[in-house]
Amino acid sequence: MTAKDTLFDRASNPLELSPEAMRQLVDAAMARLVPLLESLPRQPAADTEGGVEVARSLIESAPESGRPLDEILDLLFDKAVPKSFNTAGPGYLAYIPGGGLFQSAVADLMASSFNRFTGVFAAAPALAQLEANVVRWFADIVGYPPESRGILTPGGSIANWIGLVTARRERLGEAFHDGVVYTSDQSHHSVLKSAILTGFAESRVRRLPSDSSQRLDLAALERAIRADRAAGLRPAVVNANAGTTNTGAIDPLPELADLATAEGLWLHVDAAYGGFFAMTERGRDALRGLERADSLVLDPHKALFLPYGTGALLVRDGEALRRTHGLRADYMPPIQDDPDLIDFCEISPELSRPFRGLRVWLPIQMHGLDAFRRNLDEKLDLAHWAADELERIESVRLVARPRLSLLAFRIEPPGLEGEPLEAFNRAVLDGVNQRGQVYLTGTVLDGRFVLRICVLSFRTHRDRVDTALDQIRDEIEQRLSA
C-alpha cells in the first residue's frame, strides 16, 4: 500500500479508535482518576515546591510519533498533577474554591464525544434547548423575569466583559468615549480589565472607596456622578459586588438599584461568588436587590461546585443581548424568529462554542437543586461557626464577618505593631499552609495584611474547618511563646 492509499484507508488511521480501544482508553484513565479522587482528603492541600523545575523539565517539541498511554498517564498523574494547589480537595479554603463535580466531568466526556454544534439552534435544537433550560433555571434562582436571557461563558471574567459590552451599547451607543464606569476598590480585577477591553479609557473607570464594611460607598458614588456630569461626561455603568473576593462583602444592592434608575445608569452586578447563595433563605436575604440588576454574573464553577471554565451572564432585558451581539451571515443556518427559541450566537460573541450546558444540566438532573441548596447551607453554617470560634481566640480580630461563606481576620497580639505585626500574620499563614492539611490565603485591606477563609467545596465539612482552626490556634501560640 502506498502513502497515498493510506490517506483513504480508515483501518490505518490511528485517530479512528475501535470500540475496544475507546473502552481501554477510558478504563485506563479511570484507573488513575478514581484513586486520585478517593485520596483527596489525604493529599496535601497545596504542594508547589519544586513545581517550577518540573514545569521546565516538561518543555518539549511536538512529537512526530505517539508514546505509550501508560507513559503519558504517568507523566500527568505522577509528575504534573501533584505539583499544584489541590483545588478539588476538602482542605482548599483559599481564594474562592471550585470543587469540580465528577458528574460534570462525565458530562464533558459525553459532550466532547458527540461534539454537536450548539452555537445555532438549527444545528442541535434539543441540545440548545437543554442549555437554554439551564440559563432559565439560573434566572429563576436570582428572581429575573421571563423576558431575561443569558449565556454560559468560560468564566466570570469573560461574563463581566460581555456584560459591560452590552451595557455600553445600551447606554452609550456608537459614541462612547465620554462614558464613565463606576466600581468599588473591592471589585474583582476583571471588572477594570473588562471596562478597558470594552473601550473605556482607564481614566474613565472610577474605582471608588468602600466603607468600613468593604461595601461601595453610596455617597462617594453620588458625588462622582455629579462631578462627571458637571465635567461634560456621561455616567453610564455602575458595577456592584455580590460577594467580593477579598472579604465576601455585598454592596447595598437595593440602594444602588434606586440610584441607577434615577440616574439612568446600567447596574451590572458581579455575583460570580455570591449569586447562587440566593437558593438559600439566608442568601436571598443577604442578596436582596440582586433581581433588579440590568445584568449580573454567576460562576457555577464556584457555588455550584462545577469544574473551572463554567461562568454565566444574565441580562434582565434579554433583547439587549440580541441588540448588542446579533449579526447574520449568508453561510449560517437559519436563525430562529420564534422568541422562545434561542440561537446563542445571536446573544453572545461566540459562534463556535462547546456544549457547556451539559456539565450543568446533568448534575442538576441527577440530584435536583435541593442537594446544592443543602450544601450551600452547610457552607454558610461552617463559615459562621468558624467566625465565632476565631473570635474566641485571644488576639484575633475579625475584619469581616461572613455575609456568605467567606471571612477575613487579623491577629493583633499586644505590643506588636507595624512591620513586625505584618510579619507575624504572614508567618501564621505560612505555618498553617506548610502543614499541608488546609490551604489559606491572605489579602491586604487598608494597607494591612489579613487572613481569609472561604468555605465553598462540596467536599469540605466540619472536620476540615476544625482542623484549620486548631492549626491557626497552634501557630499563634507557638509564635507568642517563642
Image (cartoon, helix red, strand yellow):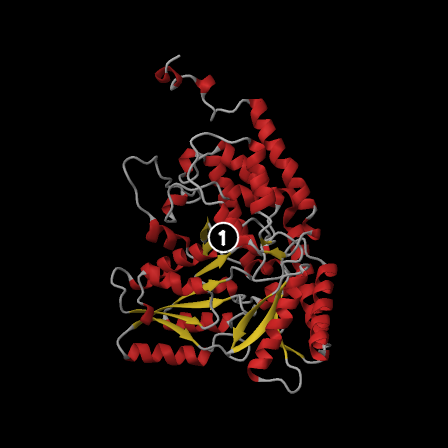
- Indicate the position of residue 143 as horizontal and vertical percent values: 53, 58
> Looking at the image, which residue is at 46% across and 72% down?
256
> Looking at the image, which residue is at 54% across and 53% down?
51
| Quarter of the figure with the N terminus | top left
Q: Amino acid at mark 1?
A: Gly
Q: Residue furthest top?
A: 1
Q: Nearer the viewer, residue 434 or 95?
A: 434
Task: Provide the residue designation for mark 1.
Answer: 311
Left or right of 104 on screen, residue 118: left
Left or right of 442 on screen, residue 11: left
Q: Nearer the viewer, residue 301 or 266?
A: 301
> Looking at the image, which residue is at 58% across and 74% down?
450
Left or right of 482 on screen, residue 347: left
Would residue 22 be seen by someone viewing this image from the given angle? yes
Q: Nearer the viewer, residue 114 or 90?
A: 90
Would residue 309 be seen by someone viewing this image from the given angle? no
